[in-house]
Amino acid sequence: MTTTTRAARDDEHDATGESSEIGGSHDLSTWATLKRGLELSPELVKGLWVTVALAIFATLGKVLIPFVVQQATDHGILAEGGADVDFVLRAVLLAAGAIIFTGLAQYVVNVRLFKAAESGLATLRLTAFRHIHDLSVLTQSTERRGSLVARVTNDVDTISMFVQFGGIMLLVSSAQILVATILMVFYSPILAGVVYLCVIPLVVLITKFQPMLGRAYGAVRVRVGELLGAVSESIVGAVTIRAYGVENRTEQRIDGAIENHRAAAIKAQIRSVIAFVSGQAFGGITTAIVLVVGTVLAANDQMSLGQLLAFLFLVNLFTQPVQQATEIFNELQNAVAGWRRVIGVIDTPADVSDPGEAGVQLPRGPITVQFEDVAYSYPGGDRVLQDVTLTLEPQTRVAVVGETGSGKTTLAKLLTRLMDPSEGRVLIDGVDLREIAFSSLRRRIVMVPQEGFLFDQSLMENIRFGRPEAENEDIELAMTELGLDPWLSGLPMGLATQVGQRGESLSAGERQLVAIARAYLADPDLLVLDEATSAVDPATEVRIQRALEGLTRGRTSVAIAHRLSTAEAADVVVVVDKGRIVAVGPHHELVNAGGVYTRMHASWAVQQQG
Ligand SMILES: Nc1ncnc2c1ncn2[C@@H]1O[C@H](COP(=O)(O)OP(=O)(O)OP(=O)(O)O)[C@@H](O)[C@H]1O
C-alpha cells in the first residue's frame, strides 16, 4: 500500500474529529490492547497456525526462483561439457509447477485472512454495538454519541485494514525473511552475515523515524478534525450564518482549516517519502556490498557464479519486507489505536444493567409508582434531585411542573430507568425498578419524548416500532381510536406516506402524533410524557390533545408539563423546585395555596392573555 492511500485512510479514519475517550482503556499498553482485542475477536486467531504454515509454503515459491537460477547456471549453462539445455528446461518446468502450487497457497492464505478478519471484526462490532445499547443515556449523552458511532465504524475499520493488509504483509514478510535467511546461510554464511550487518542501520533508522512519522500523521488527523468541525458547523449553522451576515468569518475559518490541513499533510507526506527512499537506498547499498564481497568470494572459489546470482535475488527478497516494516508498523499503530477506542467502549461498565432472566416479570394491570427518598446527581455534579418521596396512585393523570432546570426530566428518566437513582429507590407496584427484567419493564412503561425519533420509513412502519409484532389492522385501528383518521386522509398516501430522514417531511405537530400513536400501540400501563414545547397550529393542537386523551385513558400517566393547561386537566400536580418536591395535589387546591405553583400559574395566565 502506498503512503498516499495510507494518508487518505488516516484522514477518513478521523473524519469524526473525535478525541474524547470513554472508559479507561486508553491507558492500556500495546500488548495488553492486542491481547484484549484478540480475546474479543477469537476468530482472528482461530486456525492461524494453518494460515502461517501456508504462508511459509507460499513463500517457498518466491525463493524457488533464485534456487532455480543457481541450479540452471551452475549445472545447466556452466555444466561440464557444455550447456545442458534439457536440464535448464526441466528445472524451469519444475519451478513453474511449484510456483502454481505456491500461488494457490498464497490465494488460500489471503482468503483465510480476509475471512478471519471480517468474522472477527463483525463480532467486535456486534459486541461494541450491543454494549452501547446497555450504556445509559447518560454515558451516551450529547457530544459522545458521535464518537460512539465512530468507534463501531471507523475505528473497527482501521483494525480491519491492519488485519487484512498489514496482517498479510506481516505474515508474508516474516515468512519471506525467514526462508530467504535460511537459503542465504545455506549458500554463504559470510554473505548472509554481511546482509544482516547492513540491516542494522536501517532498523535504527526505522525505530527513530517511526515516532516522527506517527506524530506527523497524528497532526494531520487533528487538522482533519478541525476542518470537518468547521465545515459541519458552517453547514448546520447555515441559516444563522446567513441571518447574521457572518459568511466572511465562517469562510476565513474554513480557509484557515484547509490551509493548516494542507501544510500538515505535505509535512507528513515528505516524511513518508524520506522513509521510503531510505528503504530503497538501503536495498541498493546492500546489493552493491553483496556484489563486491560475493565477487571476492567467487574469485576465491568460495562461491559459484550461480550461487552469487541466486544470492542477489535473495537479497532483494530479504530487503523488500524490511523496507515495508515502516508501513506495517504504521498500520499496526493505527490498528492498536482503533482497538483501544473500541475496547474503551466495550469495557465501560453498563451503569444501568438488565437483571435479565433473574429479573422480576410484572403482571399487566394498573400501576402504582413510588419514589422513596430518591436523590440524584449527574457524575461529577451537584444534587439535582433530593428527598423525593412520592406515591402515584394507579390510573391517575399526573402533571409534573417546575421552572426550567428544576429536575423534571431527571425525574422522568429515573422513572423509566434510563438512569438509576444515586440514593433511594423507585418502585412500581412495590418492586424496585432495578429488579425488574428489561423485557417486562419496557412493556409496561413507555416514554413519549418531546421529539420522538422517526426512521426514514413509512408512517406505518414508524408506528409499528411501538409493537413490532402488530398487524397493519392493529395500527389502522389504533389510528381510528385516537381520532387520527381525518389527519391520515389528508396525507398523500395515508399510512404509507414516507416520513423522510428523521421525519423531516412531517411537521413538528405531526411528528408528535406519530409518537403518540406509537405509544398507544405499545399499550403500556404507565406512560411518561415529556410534553413538547414547540408551538403547533390550533387544528393540530386539538388533534394532539384528543389523541393524548385517548392515550392516557385508563393508564397511570406522568406528564412533564410545559403548558399549565396540562396541569389544570391533570388529577394530580407535582411541583418540583430546585430538585425538591414542594407541593402535590390537584390544580384547584394548589393554584390558590400561594406557593411556587400559584406564581407559575399566574405568570402563565398573563402570558396566555398576552
Ligand atoms: N446530562 C446531564 N449532565 C449534567 N447535568 C445535567 C444533565 N442533564 C441535566 N442536568 C442538570 O440537571 C438539572 C435538572 O435538569 P432537568 O433536565 O431535569 O430539568 P428540567 O426541569 O427538565 O428542565 P427543562 O424544563 O428546561 O427541561 C439542571 O440543572 C441541569 O443543568
Image (spheres, rainbow, N blue to C red):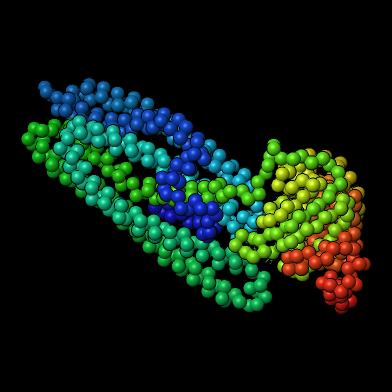
Rendered position, 297 above or below 230: above
Rendered position, 241 above or below 286: below
Q: Outermost residue toward the right? A: 588
Q: Quadrant of the C terminus?
A: bottom right
Find residue 402 and report its image quarter: bottom right
Residue 174, percent from left and from top: 33, 38
Q: Residue at x 17, y 35 (%)?
A: 189
Q: Is residue 412 left or right of residue 177?
A: right
Q: Residue at x 55, y 54 (%)?
A: 22
Depth check, front residue: 34 or 399: 399
Q: Is residue 384 left or right of residue 231?
A: right
Depth check, front residue: 170 or 343: 343
Depth check, front residue: 89 or 33: 33
Q: Can residue 577 be seen in this snapshot?
A: yes
Q: Can residue 504 be seen in this snapshot?
A: no
Residue 175, percent from left and from top: 33, 35
Q: Is residue 481 left or right of residue 205?
A: right
Residue 169, percent from left and from top: 38, 41
Find residue 232 and report its image quarter: bottom right
Total label count? 0
Q: Residue at x 50, y 56 (%)?
A: 14
Residue 251, percent from left and from top: 55, 72
